[in-house]
Image (cartoon, helix red, strand yellow):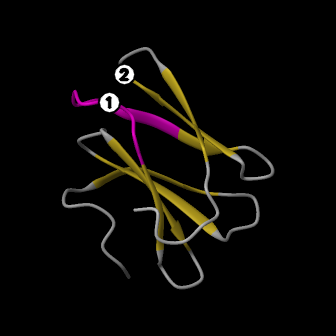
Amino acid sequence: MFPAHNSSISCMTLNFSGNLLATASDKGTLIRIFSTEDGTPLQEVRRGSDKAEIYSIAFDKNSHWIACSSDKGTIHIFTVSQEKGRI
């Protein structure tokens, strides 16, 4: 176990290799990416500043990109950094 967010997690997904975990809280403003090997936080990306319900999070096959959809009618796409400590 490791702390991912200050509030409840509303959505999470693993990449195809199973070595990265992406999470979003019920606030829906931040997506955090962690190493599943040791729980190290790797990256944090901001979807927006308004509260949103995250419907889904998905990595591309090679874990270079992550996308999320929300009740705002938008899809956000972010570059995934493989460097540790970007959070």
User: Along the line of sight, which residue is nearer the eye, 12 or 47?
Assistant: 47
Q: Secondary structure at mark 1?
A: loop
Please state which of the two labelled residues, at mark 2 or mark 1, is closer to the viewer: 1
* Residue identified by numbered label 2: 71
Query: Which corner quadrant of the image does residue 8 belong to?
Result: bottom left
Query: Which corner quadrant of the image does residue 82 belong to?
Result: bottom right
Separation of marks 2 and 1 at Cα, in angstroms: 12 Å
Label ID, residue 77: none
Q: Is residue 87 left or right of residue 52?
A: right
Q: Is residue 19 left or right of residue 7?
A: right
Q: Residue at x 19, y 56 (%)?
A: 7
Q: Position of residue 43 (x, y in %)?
A: 48, 58
Amino acid beneath label 1: Gly
User: Along the line of sight, which residue is nearer the eye, 20 or 49?
Assistant: 49
Question: From what the image shows, is residue 36 above or below residue 76?
Answer: below
Amino acid beneath label 2: Asp
* Residue identified by numbered label 1: 48
Q: Residue at x 60, y 67 (%)?
A: 83
Q: Is residue 47 magenta?
A: yes
Q: Residue furthest top?
A: 73
User: Along the line of sight, which residue is nearer the eye, 84 or 51?
Assistant: 84
Name which of mark 2 and mark 1 comes first in the sequence: 1
Q: Residue furthest right?
A: 62
Which part of the image, by quadrant, shows the C terminus? bottom left
